Amino acid sequence: MIIIKTPEEIEKMRIANQVVVKALLKLKEMVKPGITTAELDIVAEESIRGAGARPSFKGYRGFPASLCASINEVVVHGIPGKRKLQEGDIIGLDLGAEYEGYYGDAAITLPVGKITPEAERLLRVTREALYKGIERMKEGNRLSDISHAVQVHAEAAGFSVVTDFVGHGIGTAPHEDPQVPNYGPAGQGPILKRGMVLAIEPMINAGGHPVQVLEDEWTVVTRDRKLSAHFEHSIAITETGPDILSEFAWS
Ligand code: MG
């Protein structure tokens, strides 16, 4: 069942999402060669707690950290640790917060120093695909219109869409109905209505779409070990169109 949120609830969710965004912007300034993902995780947690919120990934199904830090071939759910970022890496930062019972969730993928033109293109196209999906979040459209728009944009660039993990509803739980795949034909699924809040999160691979989970039971990598990128926003559907609760100035 898709839970409809009141305007008041959406404002609480905007606060939760802006707590996430504030932390992500701090991390963005720190992402440089030599820093460890554990150091990023500490700052993420301090930033969220300092804003009166709770890092919602920490302890979720046993996840050991506040931040998911996913380097290069890691698609999502990378566990922060002692690994140092290196020039030319890309790093996905996925972060969630709970504020007064409402959840926020957003992700960005950043370059570490100078990256290859192909890696730059992957980041750009993945972010664009997210916005192509968001553009479809209008009352009266169907859920899979979002999915289809993401897939078309990613595949037109020669990249492939991860199918094993999907976006989701969000609200008083970090994951609510519906699931939001990043692929599929348009015109299917529930009709979009105002008050729905969805986390749209394309995971796009430079090579093939297959992924695998490593022995830590969290880290998801591309099977061909080629690069993967991930961008995510939490977005409310309003009478005037999509309202990106986690929006911020990217650069
Ligand atoms: Mg999410």
Image (cartoon, rainbow, N blue to C red):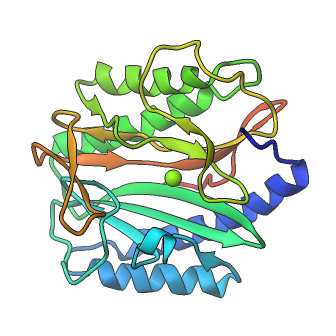
Residue 251 shows in this picture: no
Question: 2 left or right of 35?
Answer: right
**Extreme residue toward the left, this view:** 224
Lateral position of residue 126 relative to residue 247, left or right: left
Looking at the image, is 192 positioned above or below residue 179?
above
* Position above or below: 139 against 165: above
Query: In this view of the protein, which residue sits in the foreground, 61 or 57?
Result: 61
Residue 11 pos. (x, y %): 82, 57
Quadrant of the drawing holding the N terminus: top right
**Residue at the spot x=61%, y=28% of the render?**
135
Drawn side of residue 198 relative to residue 149, left or right:
right
- Quadrant position of residue 171: bottom right
Q: Residue at x 67, y 78 (%)?
A: 53
Instruction: Indicate left or right for 221 with 37 as reference.
Output: left
Task: Return the x and y of residue 218 as percentages of the image width and height.
Answer: 30, 63
> Which of 240 and 216 lies nearest the eye of the viewer?
216
Residue 18 spot, x, y in % from top left: 66, 64
